Amino acid sequence: MAVEGAVGTGGEPESSDSLRTFGAVVQALREHAGLSREEFGERVRFSKHTVASVELGRRMPDPTFVERAEAALGNTGALRKAAGHLARQPGLAAWFRQWARLEATAITLYTYECRLLPGLLQTEAYARTLFTNQLPPLDDAQIEAQWVARAERQRLLRERPNTAFGFILEEGLLLRRTGGVEVTRGLIDHVLEIAQLRNVEIQVMPQVRETHAGLDGPMQLLETPDNRWFVYCEGQESGQLIADPKVVSMLQMRYARMRSQALTLEDSLSLMQRMRGDL
């Protein structure tokens, strides 16, 4: 099963040219200073594995890394300037990137999911559980790159208050207890918190439902600033971006029917609160 845009097959996350270039500059400056990765890591207070991931273009360096690296490597300003041109692509599967670019500017984003909690709603503990159980296995750098990419996407919920987000979640996703009781408890708390945002609506599709318009599988629908609609459907190691107006219209119809079949917003929150209390 694909993990919503995550890189699978045990291969390295595909890094962008800007990330590889930034990493090469960090490595060149580090080696010019006569520092090993471990010594440099001690100075910037990041592990040597993180340093290696940045230098190899597999990880997006956060602002703290950039600032500490500047101080450790002579305050030339080169890293600060280069960081402004980084493309945030590692950790996302190639087939997901076009959707991710649309997602970043969408004015409406609807998601129905029946396999796992959508990436935009995941906690770090839940996401890392998915990553560490992926087959073939991922190494630590790959897991870190995937979490960084996912956390970056999650900023959309709070940084785009004028975007309308809607989620329909199968009740079974929370009953499964992926990662154990503590992970599930934290996940429900997080979803309940996100549900308080004015631009987010979360509904639960009850486990017992005689009619269900979403039996063909998960889907995501979005509206662009110029009011065009697209759909994204993901499966095993693949994803399909759909722009055909007839297909998009059909899937919009299905999503609208599911909104009427799922619990109301208030009943959905009450159910999740009861599930939280039962853990």
Image: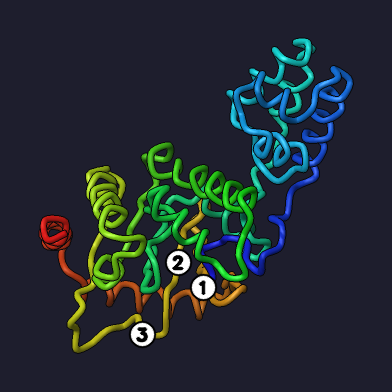
In which quadrant of the rendered view does residue 235 lie?
bottom right
In this view, the residue in front, 2 or 135, is 135
Q: Residue at x 45, y 46 (%)?
A: 154
How far across and down, in percent of the image, does residue 255 sit? Answer: 34, 73
Q: Is the C-beta separation of discs 3 and 2 under 8 Å?
A: no
Query: Which is nearer the N-term, disc 2 or disc 1?
Result: 2
Q: Residues within 10 Å of mark 1 (few under 14, many from 20)?
A: some
Tell me the SS state at disc 3.
loop
In which quadrant of the rendered view does residue 138 lie?
bottom right
How many angstroms separate mark 3 from mark 2 (CA)? 14 Å
In this view, the residue in front, 259 or 279, is 279
The numbered mark at residue 233 is 1
Q: Residue at x 50, y 80 (%)?
A: 246
Amino acid type of the residue tagged 1 in the rendering: Cys
Q: Could you tell whether 235 is left or right of 210 in the image?
A: right
Q: Is the C-beta separation of discs 2 and 1 under 8 Å?
A: yes
Q: Residue tagged by mark 2? A: 220
Q: Name above or below for residue 220 compared with residue 123.
A: below
Q: Could you tell whether 60 is left or right of 17 in the image?
A: left
Query: Which is nearer the N-term, disc 1 or disc 3?
Result: 3
Q: Could you tell whether 2 is left or right of 50 in the image?
A: left
In which quadrant of the rendered view does residue 270 lie?
bottom left
How far across and down, in percent of the image, does residue 139 sit? Answer: 63, 55
The numbered mark at residue 215 is 3
How far across and down, in percent of the image, does residue 143 sit? Answer: 58, 52
